[in-house]
Amino acid sequence: MVAGAESAQPVDRSLFTDLHALIAAGDRRFQLLSTVHDAAEPLAQLEAMTHTSMWNMQRHASLSGLSDGEGLTERSRRRGVELRYILPRRVAEQRCPLASSHWPHLRLAPVPHPLMVVDGTRVLVGDSTGETLWTTSDPSLVARAARYYDRVWQAAPPAVPEGEEPPFTPRMVQVGIRLVDGSTDREIARALGVSERTVSSDVREMSQRLGERSRTHAIALIAGING
């Protein structure tokens, strides 16, 4: 469902090698933010304090992640925060096919390790094990991470080519998230303030766009089960 091809340029891992080495050595410029599994609340607090930009690259994405971040993303958009998101193409296409509709700014590129650059003043990065999340505001480290991110961003094709519409409408994304959570059409209709017929029509349209006649198979694809 996602158009475009990933950048074929070699992946530069030296930034992450250096950052991971500093974290492992206990460099005082880094502070432990949380474990990856407990990151939702700290990230929500960080989002509330973000003023200008949030640049994010992740190796993985899931529909549950879209659901968890649905409100955060919308609040950032309303505040005029510049949102950039990079995912590997296979992840965006197969593991999270709603991603390009949820994040219209999504671009596709290989991602060696997760990285966030916030307001050009703070970096978030996982350690080498991928189990803990660390942050630094050191100007030299932030500048280097921001340059790296921008190089990848500029070379990466957009998931939705310029001039084209995303595969799914914003409401379809909301419907898909709730479908996978097990909600019925009636429950989704109540949550979104639309008719049950509208929800059923959206589900049929999503199934057609995914190339699936079976509602069950379409939901499985939306959930990334076949990815």
Image: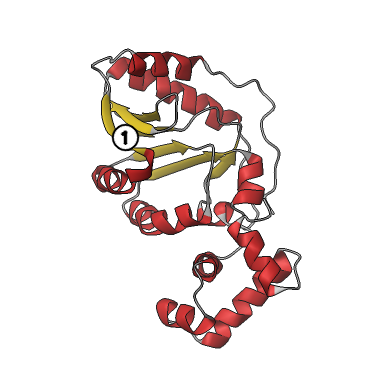
Return the x and y of residue 83 as percentages of the image width and height: 43, 44
Instruction: Work out which quarter of the rendered image holds the N terminus and state it.
Output: bottom right
Is 25 situated above or below 136?
above
- Characterize the local packing of mark 1: few (<14), some (14-19) or many (20 or more) Cα atoms within 10 angstroms: some
At horizontal 28% and vertical 14% (from top left) the residue drawn is 27
Return the x and y of residue 22 as percentages of the image width and height: 35, 14
- Kindly identify which residue carries mark 1: 119
Return the x and y of residue 23 as percentages of the image width and height: 34, 18
Res 193 seen here: yes
Is 99 situated above or below 196?
above
Is 154 situated above or below 176?
above
On screen, residue 97 versus residue 44, left or right, reads: right
At horizontal 36% and vertical 20% (from top left) the residue drawn is 143
The mark tally for this picture is 1
On screen, residue 88 versus residue 191, left or right, reads: right
Q: In which quarter of the image is residue 156?
A: top right
Res 159 seen here: no
Of 110 and 169, nearer the camera is 110
Return the x and y of residue 140 as percentages of the image width and height: 32, 15
At horizontal 63% and vertical 67% (from top left) the residue drawn is 219
Of 144 and 185, nearer the camera is 185
On screen, residue 81 versus residue 48, left or right, reads: right
Q: Specify the color scheme.
A: secondary structure
Is 90 situated above or below 204?
above
On screen, residue 44 versus residue 211, left or right, reads: left
Secondary structure beneath label 1: loop
Kind of residue at disc 1: Asp
Q: Quadrant of residue 180?
A: bottom right
